[in-house]
Image (spheres, rainbow, N blue to C red):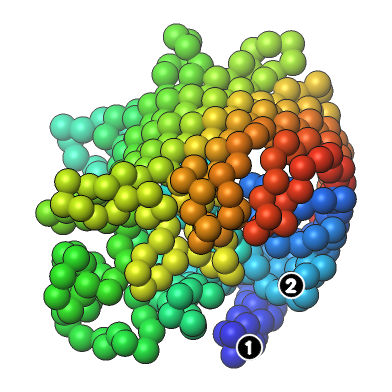
């Protein structure tokens, strides 16, 4: 890790030389976050008990973009979460770093890769383009992102590799589909060979030399209705923890609807979202309760936090959240979430040793002026998660940032 970030810092300083490009842009940002209690469902709050300080430097030109972020968490100390170095050429991008990803059409969560856990160290490649076919609409386009990185704290008592690929296709305007897959591998028992590579990319991971690979896959869809008709977006996602006949099985689900009321006196965006990570025994006797994000060789985690939904395995979440703009500088954020965590009361669950049901209600105020931003919130948690140190009660928080 030290070698990784030494090379990153060296590349950043080399690229940020003013003589490198006349059209380069250099930005600095510093922020401070404080909260009285740990909050459920927010990555930084789960990692730090009461304070987080961040300093970032961003550099961009036509070929190179870099983002060096130094975070200091109360519990985790100094880290580089969010930092990356990226090279761009035409429609292609190649880079490496620790990027927060949200592979979903939901702005809030994902079943496959979300910002619930700390970002993994990875290299990545992304390409996007139009189909450029005469018989298709000009708005038709597609993109593909491929990553390979390393997670921390898996059951193999070391790093595990994580290969992932996501393709997004838009056949017509306002309609999008996504296909994605992750393969978790690596460890003392793994041997790199052609059979393993085939299993990671395409093959059956239920048997043979690839049986130890933890593969997850699924698809999603988004439809945005014409604004003149009804300003609503409908989206959904499903992910399989296991596979049957090379297709996902033992599924979890995410569905949501977003309503954008931007023509009101006080423009408002409101979202309803439902997530269900409960799994049942399949027709072939696989999976069963508590299977999502768990595998006989690997947990689907980074630093003990699920890489997917924040409710982890065997849970449900129904959430209403919204934001109303009072003016160009001031907005109000609000949400209410009803949760079931560890529905089968499995003692090995990562968040709680018991079945917990409850709600979380939050209200926040955000003010922006030029380069300064300040946010305050109050959060009421009506559930206790003993393993995640989430307590029932009220939490207050404050965050500020300035860009210069």
Q: Residue 366, image x and y in percent?
A: 82, 35
Is residue 141 among the parts visible in the rendering?
no
Element at label 2: loop
Q: Is residue 68 above or below residue 352?
A: below
Which image quarter is the N terminus in? bottom right
Left or right: 247, with 330 as reference point:
left
Q: Residue 29, image x and y in percent?
A: 80, 60
Q: Is residue 205 above or below residue 40?
A: below
Residue 28: mark in rendering: none
2 or 1: tag closer to the N-terminus: 1
> Do residues under tags 2 and 1 come within 8 Å of each other at their CB atoms?
no
Which image quarter is the C terminus in? bottom right
Left or right: 340, with 391 as reference point:
left
What residue is shown at x 69% (from left), y 18% (from top)? 267
The one nearer the camera, 296 or 15, is 296
The one nearer the camera, 23 or 116, is 116
Q: Residue 285, image x and y in percent?
A: 20, 53
What residue is shown at x 60% (from left), y 53% (from top)? 352
Left or right: 104, with 131 as reference point:
right
Residue 76: mark in rendering: 2
What residue is shown at x 17% (from left), y 79% (from top)? 209
Mark 2 or 1: the one toward you = 2
What residue is shown at x 57% (from left), y 26% (from top)? 271
Identify the residue position indicated by label 1 in the image. 2
Q: Is residue 253 above or below residue 291?
A: above
Element at label 1: helix
The one nearer the camera, 343 or 149, is 343
Q: Residue 258, image x and y in percent?
A: 53, 24
Distance from Cα at disc 2 to Cα at disc 1: 16 Å
Left or right: 349, with 297 as reference point:
right
Q: Is residue 170 above or below residue 76?
A: above
């Amino acid at each position: 890790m030290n070698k990784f970030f030494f090379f990153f810092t060296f590349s950043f300083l080399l690229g940020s030389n003013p003589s490198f490009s006349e059209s380069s842009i250099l930005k600095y940002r510093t922020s401070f976050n404080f909260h009285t209690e740990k909050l459920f469902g927010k990555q930084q709050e789960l990692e730090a008990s009461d304070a987080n300080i961040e300093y970032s430097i961003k550099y961009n030109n036509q070929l190179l973009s870099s983002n060096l972020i130094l975070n200091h968490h109360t519990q985790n100390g100094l880290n580089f979460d969010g930092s990356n170095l990226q090279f761009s050429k035409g429609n292609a991008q190649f880079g490496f770093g620790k990027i927060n990803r949200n592979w979903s059409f939901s702005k809030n969560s994902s079943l496959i890769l979300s910002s619930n856990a700390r970002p993994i160290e990875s290299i990545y490649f992304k390409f996007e383009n139009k189909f450029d076919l005469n018989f298709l609409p000009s708005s038709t386009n597609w993109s593909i992102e491929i990553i390979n990185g390393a997670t921390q704290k898996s059951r193999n008592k070391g790093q595990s590799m994580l290969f992932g690929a996501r393709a997004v296709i838009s056949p017509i305007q306002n309609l999008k589909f996504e296909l994605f897959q992750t393969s978790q591998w690596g460890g003392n028992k793994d041997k790199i060979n052609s059979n393993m590579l085939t299993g990671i990319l395409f093959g059956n991971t239920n048997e043979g030399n690839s049986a130890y690979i933890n593969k997850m896959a699924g698809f999603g869809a988004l439809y945005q209705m014409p604004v003149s008709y009804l300003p609503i977006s409908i989206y959904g996602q499903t992910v399989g923890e296991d596979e049957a006949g090379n297709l996902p099985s033992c599924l979890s689900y995410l569905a949501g609807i977003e309503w954008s009321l931007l023509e009101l006196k006080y423009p408002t965006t409101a979202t309803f979202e439902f997530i269900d990570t409960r799994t049942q025994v399949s027709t072939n006797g696989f999976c069963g309760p508590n299977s999502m994000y768990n595998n006989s060789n690997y947990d689907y985690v980074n630093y003990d936090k699920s890489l997917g939904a924040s409710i982890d395995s065997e849970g449900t979440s129904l959430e209403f959240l919204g934001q109303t703009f009072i003016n160009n500088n001031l907005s109000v954020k609000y949400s209410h979430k009803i949760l079931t965590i560890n529905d089968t009361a499995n003692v090995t669950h990562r968040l709680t040793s018991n079945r917990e049901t409850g709600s979380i209600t939050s209200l926040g105020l955000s003010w922006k002026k030029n380069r300064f931003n300040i946010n305050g919130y109050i959060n009421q948690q009506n559930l206790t998660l003993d393993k995640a140190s989430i307590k029932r009660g009220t939490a207050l928080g404050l965050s500020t940032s300035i860009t210069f």
